[in-house]
Image (cartoon, rainbow, N blue to C red):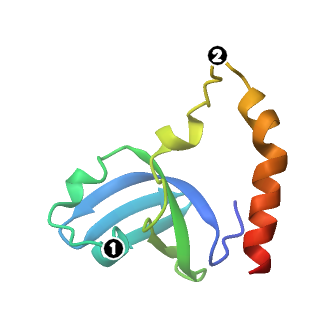
Amino acid sequence: MEDFKVGSIVKGEVTGIEPYGIFVSIDDYAGLIHISEIADSFVSNISKYVTLGERIYAKIIEVDKENKKLKLSIKGLNYKEFYANRKVKESVRGFSPLQENLERWTKEALEEMEH
């Protein structure tokens, strides 16, 4: 069993979708993502964000250890499991653009920070 902490990112399974939020099962805890914690914009249809059985990532905003409940948020997260497992494809040029520009980019960033 995981020791849940506020601010941690956890992975769980969507077990319910209601007009007011998303229920997520994480280990032996029940989590709720209230509709206000789904997006910064107006959410008219929660089903546009998740589906039953889907595995998602969420941020813990409150822990109730006694009742084994979590309040969660997906605002600002790439919460879909797809994003977390996606591999970066190497371009034909490989890392040469980084090698060619790193010194200049570093110098520009340092100059910007000084001002």
Q: Amino acid at mark 2?
A: Val
Element marked by disc 1: loop
Residue 40 is tagged as: 1
Query: Viewed as shown, does residue 96 lie left or right of 54?
Result: right
Quadrant housing residue 91:
top right
Q: Which residue, given by chain and number where applicable, does mark 2 sit on?
A: 92
Residue 12 drawn at (x, y percent)? 50, 53
Which mark's residue is nearer the viewer, 1 or 2?
A: 2
Q: Nearer the viewer, residue 108 or 54?
A: 108
Res 33 visible: yes
Quarter of the image that includes the C terminus: bottom right
Residue 67 drawn at (x, y percent)? 52, 80
Q: Residue furthest top?
A: 92
Q: Amino acid at mark 1?
A: Asp
Quarter of the image that includes the N terminus: bottom right
**Label 2, residues with CA under 10 Å away: few <14, some 14-19, many ≥20:** few
Q: Are marks 1 and 2 in contact (CB under 8 Å)?
A: no
**Badge 1 or badge 2: first in the primary sequence:** 1
Quadrant housing residue 44:
bottom left
Residue 112 drawn at (x, y percent)? 72, 71
Q: Nearer the viewer, residue 69 or 35?
A: 35
